[in-house]
Image (tube, rainbow, N blue to C red):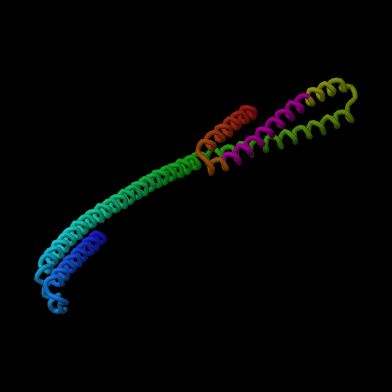
Amino acid sequence: ALAAVVARCADAHDRRNEGNGEQRKLLDATAGEPSETDLYTAFAEAVAPSYVRQMRAALDDAVAEVADLRVELHEEQRTNNIAALERELAEEIAARREAERKYRDAVEHESQLRADVKRLERDAQHARPEVRRLRDELAQLEAANERLTRQRDERQRALDELRTDTTGSLDQLTRDLASAEEELALWRRRCTDLERERDAAQRSYQTSEEALRLSLARAERRLFEATRGATVAAGAAE
């Protein structure tokens, strides 16, 4: 727009120079060498009004174009600003929605964790009596094992005394010894089974204690194994 205004001003200046040259030729033809005052007077009378009108018209056009350009620039800037604000608003809304979603997920996760902790605490409380019962049964099995060992030793001593004191009932004592040895082997097998059950119960108890801290599912499964082992041990002891 400014270049157009400059071009229009240059065009008007050229037209003014052309009018000035024609006026000078006219004065040269009518009177000899004109004075500078005569030239300015002739220029003012012949060229100035039209030049002023042209300059005013050019200036008015330039002002109108500048005003139009300002309006267009203002509209474009406002449109760009509105678009930028809309983009920023959309980004902020998306960020807030994402933050709200993450917050909701965090709240739900926290609630789930609290519920899991409460369930684990309840399971641990329910498992403690069973663990104590398994410990009591294990102590009873150990006492029974010790009692059977003492009985075996007593029978062995009685057999030795009978062997030294009697000779006529050696066969009977031999049969009694065989029977006692079979019974002793049976008791040994039972003791071995009880010891294995005791070890299994102990391992199940330790595993159950660790599993209760890790997860509810593993605690329930290993508690079931410990209960089943204790039931088998109780049946064997009976």
Quarter of the picture containing the N terminus is bottom left
- Residue 220 shown left or right of residue 26 in the figure: right
- Residue 53, percent across and down? 11, 64
Name the magenta segment's main secondary structure: helix
Give me the residue at 79% from left, 26% from top.
Answer: 181
Q: Where 154 falls versus 28 (above or below)?
A: above
User: Front-most of 161 and 213?
Assistant: 213
Span shown in magenta: 182-208
- Residue 62, percent across and down? 19, 61
Give me the residue at 28% from left, 51% from top.
Answer: 83
Quarter of the picture containing the C terminus is top right
- Residue 90, percent across and down? 31, 48
Give me the residue at 64% from left, 27% from top.
Answer: 236
User: Front-most of 29 and 37?
Assistant: 29
- Residue 126 shown left or right of residue 65 in the figure: right
Give me the residue at 84% from left, 23% from top.
Answer: 173
Is residue 205 highlighted in magenta? yes
User: Front-most of 216 and 67?
Assistant: 67
- Residue 177, percent across and down? 82, 25
- Residue 206 shown left or right of residue 153 in the figure: left
Is residue 192 highlighted in magenta? yes
Q: Where 183 falls versus 85 (above or below)?
A: above
The tally of labels here is 0
Q: Where 196 falls versus 28 (above or below)?
A: above
Q: Quadrant of residue 17?
A: bottom left
